[in-house]
Structures are given as structure tokens and as C-alpha cells.
Image (cartoon, rainbow, N blue to C red):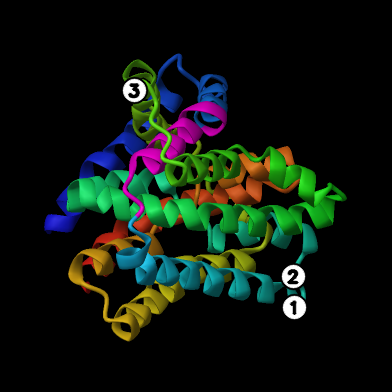
């Protein structure tokens, strides 16, 4: 019950975004602009600011980081393997594979703050810092290959990769921003979580998954069942302390990234299929994430 109540404010923001988009003058056109604002400005600033300010204690956190990368690696391997199954549409797979291993960083950071305070955010920020570039490379690769894009160029232009790498470099270099600038960046980043969660709600739609229900079911099974199970195995194998165990399990049980839809559209993928996957993943995550957290 405690974990459900911790999640409730964040999922209420998703519900509010859904209702505002469909029952007020702030319709889909408005939220498409909000999505771009969050994806290209607010969330990159949040990532940069969080990572640049967080103490990167790589020694004590090495096992947590390794566990996060292992969870992502399992998701990537399983998602890519689905392409080998008979009857799988190449364009749908290239578009949707990312939803099996990407994670909603808005929900992840908000949840980490609620159950772990500053230490939880620091741990989750480390996982975001190391795993977002890996996830984005793995997400861009099949889309670029299928659509004929230049993979290197797409990776270098990705705002989340730029922000995470920049934050890591700033942190490792000991860069200290002037207080007015640091405070400005923090306030910009603070807007990313509520707007990002409301944008997830505004974009909820289910119809696209009918293009390939079998592929959709396989991708969502990886995201919501196999990755949390992998995290539980890694927690036992690595003997992680309780605080890190909670962070890793929450990370593995996250719904998929809402920005997967933006990436698919921008790179010529099947946006409707990915939107349906994001919607289902968000709804499934609302039910399963608290249940997984009870097992930590």
C-alpha cells in the first residue's frame, strides 16, 4: 500500500494530462508542442543538472551501475531477438523494439525522490546517466538501419545523449556553475517531471497495437515481467544493500519511455504502433510497479 501511495501523485498527473487533452481547449496540438519542449529542452536540462550535481561515488555504486547496465542489456538482447521470429514486420519491430528496454525517466526520478529522497535520486540519476546513452543508441540503431538514416549523426544529435554525457563530463571535471545559473537550470529541470508526466497522459492511445498484437505482447512481456525478474536475480547475485536494491528494481519495473513515440515519428517509424505500446506500458506499469516494489 505504501508504494501505491508513493506512485499515486505521479500517476494522477498522467490522468490529469489525459483529461485536460480530451476535455478542454488544451487539445492534442498543444501537447505535441509540450512534448517537444520537454524532450528537447526541459528533460535534457534536468538530466544535465541532476548528473552534474550528484556525487558520483562510482566505487560504492559500481554494482548498482553494473546491475542497471545488465538489465538494459537483457532487454536489448531479447528485443532484438524478436526480429528473428517468423511473421514479424520489420518496420514495426524497428519502431517498437525500443519500448522493451527504454524506461520512463520522468517516472523513475519522481519515484526515486519519493521512496529514497536525495539518495534515491542520486542512485537513479547514476542509472540514468549510464543507461540512457546505451538505451538511445540501441533505440536509434534499428530505426536508422531500417529507414536509411546515418546512425552516427542521429546519435550525436540526440538531446538526451548530449545532456547525459555533458552532465557526466561536468561532474568528473568538478565544474561549479555560478549560483544564479545553477538555480536557473534547477528550476527549468523541475518543470520537466510534471509536464512530462502530463504529456504522457495526453498522448495515451491504444489503437496502434492492433497492427501486430503478438509483437506488442512480446515487447510488453519483456518490459514488465522479464526485466524485473532479471533485476531480482541480479539483486541476489550482487548482494545489493536495501537502498540500491529498491533503486534497481524500480528502474527495471518502469513503464517504457514516452519519448519513444517522438523518436519513432522523427525517424520515420510507425508512430501509432509505438504510441499504443507506450500507452499500454504506462497502464500496465501503474498496476505492476507497486507489486514488484513489494518484493524488494
For label 3, the SS is helix
Give the spatial CA distance, label 2 vs label 3: 44 Å
- Residue at the image point whose x is 19% and y is 70% from the top: 242
- Number of residues whose C-alpha sits closer than 10 Å to that of mark 3, classed few (under 14), some (14–19) or many (20 or more): some
Packing grade of label 2 (10 A; few <14, some 14-19, many >=20) is some
Mark 2 in CB contact with mark 3 (< 8 angstroms): no
In the rendered structure, which disc, 1 or 3, sits on the residue that comes first in sequence?
A: 1
Residue 184 image position (x, y, % from top left) = 37, 19
As drawn, is 200 to the left or to the right of 190?
A: right
Q: Nearer the viewer, mark 1 or mark 3?
A: 3
Circle 1 crowding by C-alpha within 10 Å: few under 14, some 14–19, many from 20: few
- In the picture, measured across the screen, residue 208 lies left or right of residue 24, that is right
Residue 143 lies, in percent from the top left, at 75, 53
Label whose residue precedes the other's in the sequence (2 or 3): 2
Percent of width and height locating residue 126: 39, 54
Which of the pair 137/181 is nearer the observer?
181
Residue 83 appears in the picture as rendered: yes
Work out how far the residue at label 2 is from the one at label 1, CA to CA, in angstroms: 8 Å
Circles 2, 1 touching at the beta carbon (< 8 Å): yes
**What residue span does the magenta drawing correspond to?**
39-56
Taking the spot 35% from the left edge, 39% from the top edge, the residue there is 53
Q: Position of residue 142 (x, y in %)?
A: 74, 59
Which quarter of the image is occupied by the C terminus?
bottom left
Q: Residue reaching furthest right? A: 148
Residue at numbered disc 3: 187
Q: What residue is shown with label 2?
A: 88
Between 160 and 4, the one nearer to me in the picture: 160
Q: Nearer the viewer, residue 185 or 197?
A: 185
Q: Residue at x 26, y 66 (%)?
A: 244
Residue tagged 1: 84
Q: Secondary structure at mark 2?
A: loop
Amino acid at each position: 500500500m505504501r508504494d501505491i501511495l508513493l506512485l499515486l501523485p505521479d500517476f494522477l498527473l498522467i490522468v490529469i494530462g489525459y483529461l485536460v487533452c480530451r476535455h478542454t481547449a488544451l487539445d492534442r496540438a498543444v501537447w505535441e508542442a509540450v512534448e517537444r519542449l520537454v524532450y528537447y529542452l526541459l528533460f535534457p536540462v534536468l538530466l544535465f543538472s541532476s548528473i552534474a550535481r550528484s556525487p558520483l561515488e562510482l566505487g560504492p555504486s559500481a554494482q548498482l551501475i553494473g546491475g542497471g547496465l545488465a538489465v538494459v542489456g537483457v532487454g536489448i538482447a531479447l528485443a532484438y531477438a524478436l526480429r528473428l521470429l517468423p511473421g514479424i514486420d520489420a518496420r514495426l519491430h524497428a519502431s517498437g523494439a525500443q519500448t522493451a528496454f527504454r524506461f520512463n525517466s520522468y517516472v523513475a526520478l519522481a519515484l526515486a525522490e519519493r521512496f529514497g529522497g536525495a539518495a534515491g535520486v542520486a542512485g537513479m540519476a547514476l542509472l540514468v546517466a549510464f543507461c540512457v546513452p546505451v538505451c538511445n543508441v540501441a533505440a536509434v540503431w534499428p530505426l536508422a538501419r531500417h529507414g536509411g538514416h546515418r546512425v552516427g549523426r542521429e546519435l550525436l544529435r540526440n538531446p538526451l545523449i548530449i545532456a547525459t554525457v555533458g552532465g557526466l563530463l561536468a561532474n568528473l571535471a568538478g565544474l561549479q556553475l555560478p549560483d544564479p545559473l545553477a538555480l536557473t537550470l534547477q528550476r527549468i529541470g523541475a518543470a520537466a517531471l510534471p509536464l512530462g508526466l502530463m504529456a504522457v497522459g495526453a498522448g495515451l492511445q491504444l489503437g496502434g497495437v492492433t497492427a501486430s498484437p503478438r509483437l506488442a505482447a512480446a515487447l510488453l512481456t519483456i518490459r514488465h515481467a522479464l526485466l524485473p525478474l532479471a533485476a531480482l536475480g541480479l539483486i541476489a547475485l550482487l548482494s545489493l544493500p536495501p537502498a540500491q536494491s529498491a533503486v534497481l528494481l524500480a528502474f527495471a519495473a518502469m513503464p517504457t519511455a514516452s519519448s519513444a513515440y517522438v523518436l519513432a515519428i522523427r525517424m520515420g517509424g510507425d508512430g501509432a504502433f509505438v504510441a499504443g505500446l507506450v500507452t499500454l506500458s504506462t497502464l500496465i506499469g501503474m498496476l505492476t510497479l507497486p507489486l514488484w516494489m513489494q518484493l524488494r
